[in-house]
Amino acid sequence: MAVDTGMFTVQQTIGRVLCCACSYENPIVPNAANMCVNCLRREFNVTEILDKRVVIKHCPECDRCLQRGKTWIKARIKVKLTVQKEAVRGAVLEEKNVIEFVVEEFMCLSCTRIHADPDQWVAVVQVRQYVSHRRTLFYLEQMILKHEAAATAVKIKQGDHGIDFFFSSQSHGERFKDFVSKVTPVMKSKPSEKLKSHDAKSNIYVCRYNFLATISPICREDLICLPPKVAASLGNLGPLVICTKLVEYIVLDVEIVSPEVDIGGSRYALADAQVARLSDFGKNDPIFFIRTHLGHILNLNDSELEKYKGLVLPDAILIRKSYEEKCRRKRGKPHSWKLKSLNMEIDNKGKAEQEKMNTEYERFLKDLEENPDMRFNVSLYQNQEYQPSEIASMTDGEDVPSVPLEELLADLDLSEDEDGDTNMAG
């Protein structure tokens, strides 16, 4: 600061003083306490009003924390604090402090009731599909796992024609029912309500809600012959649009009619083919002459899946190429990828049909390998136990569909060892 006296300019400087507590050799700028920063921190603790250790009551079942002794909320923990406080006569001190949070497991009331009696559920969503296989349910299970739609379910039970999902509240059941309706074609149905108990004095009623989600029995690559009225109502579509039973045929001869074209990212080629039913091959040998869109992949002795009806329809319709002969050599061997599964209870009838379910599950895995569109909504993980065989790779050939490595996710396992260190295994 400079002061002009008229004759010359006087430079004014702020005087410095020694710390009154430690007399540090380097003078400091005067402040209200005339202390250096280190002495101020020793004399005044601005974080003394903060708790250095906090206990958080955490429910391991629903992953929520108890707030103020009455409200259960999702855990949000912030540990980095910067505190400013006036130490003495206008001297403001700023200090950063780290607080250690200790999570203490404390089960909430609703989860305690469920563990004491697992039958204390409020809403159940019964997913059903009345078909001869469970491949649609396997696909729905992977969709549920990917979107974590059943995270609030208190119990999952596998039945004969479907799966039951039990929830502790009506809203959770309704939300899960809406999810199933969005990802699968579900027939409309009204929820049912059943009175479990009531208190006439306080006018409190406890009800159970049942939501039925019946999936359409028509599955992917099924073939249906529409009735004339239905076909006319759909703009004279059909009458052949989809299938209920597939019969395997073997290709005897293929003659390309038109060159290969690309439609919607998929390749097709029109061809005339001679096929025979695999079950009749070598017996009476009836041969069918058909026109198909699979000319670009069909070769001699290939087999397809189709439906034959004795109506005014084509003798056979080729749906897709079958790799059954080549996949039979890989059956029972581990895949380079794997799927996760829901933690479900299985009834006694389901245990008796476990072998049939394993066969259907292998068929579902084969469909995933052959169809990239099905893998779009499924999370596939790397199988760390898989060891590729060079001999198997040579015999399988290059035309057998497989899951590319870039589509696989790393299966992370976050756990803590005995020393408290966190391990991450893929």
Image (cartoon, rainbow, N blue to C red):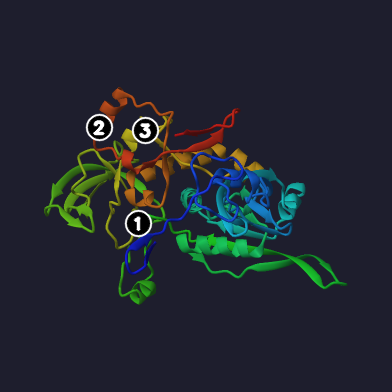
Q: Residue at x 59, y 56 (%)?
A: 32
- 111 or 157: which is nearer to us? 111
**Would residue 101 be seen by someone viewing this image from the given angle?**
no
- 5 or 139: which is nearer to us? 5
User: Residue under circle 1?
Assistant: 309
Q: Earlier in the sequence, mark 1 or mark 3?
A: 1
Distance in Å between CA atoms under marks 2 and 1: 34 Å
Distance in Å between CA atoms under marks 3 and 2: 13 Å
Q: Residue furthest front?
A: 7
The x and y percentages for residue 257 are 12, 53
Type of amino acid at the residue the image marks with label 2: Gly
Query: Which class describes the residues within 10 Å of circle 1: few (<14), some (14-19), or many (20+)?
Result: few
Q: Earlier in the sequence, mark 2 or mark 1?
A: 1
Q: Residue at x 35, y 40 (%)?
A: 279
Q: Quadrant of the C terminus?
A: top left
Circle 1 SS class: loop
Query: Which class describes the residues within 10 Å of circle 2: few (<14), some (14-19), or many (20+)?
Result: few
Distance in Å between CA atoms under marks 1 and 3: 28 Å
Q: Decide if residue 299 is on the left or right side of residue 194.
A: left
Q: Nearer the viewer, mark 3 or mark 2?
A: 2
Circle 3 SS class: helix
The x and y percentages for residue 54 are 68, 47
Query: Which class describes the residues within 10 Å of circle 3: few (<14), some (14-19), or many (20+)?
Result: few
Q: Nearer the viewer, mark 1 or mark 3?
A: 3
Disc on res. 263? none
Type of amino acid at the residue the image marks with label 1: Lys
User: Residue under circle 2?
Assistant: 397
The x and y percentages for residue 210 are 65, 63
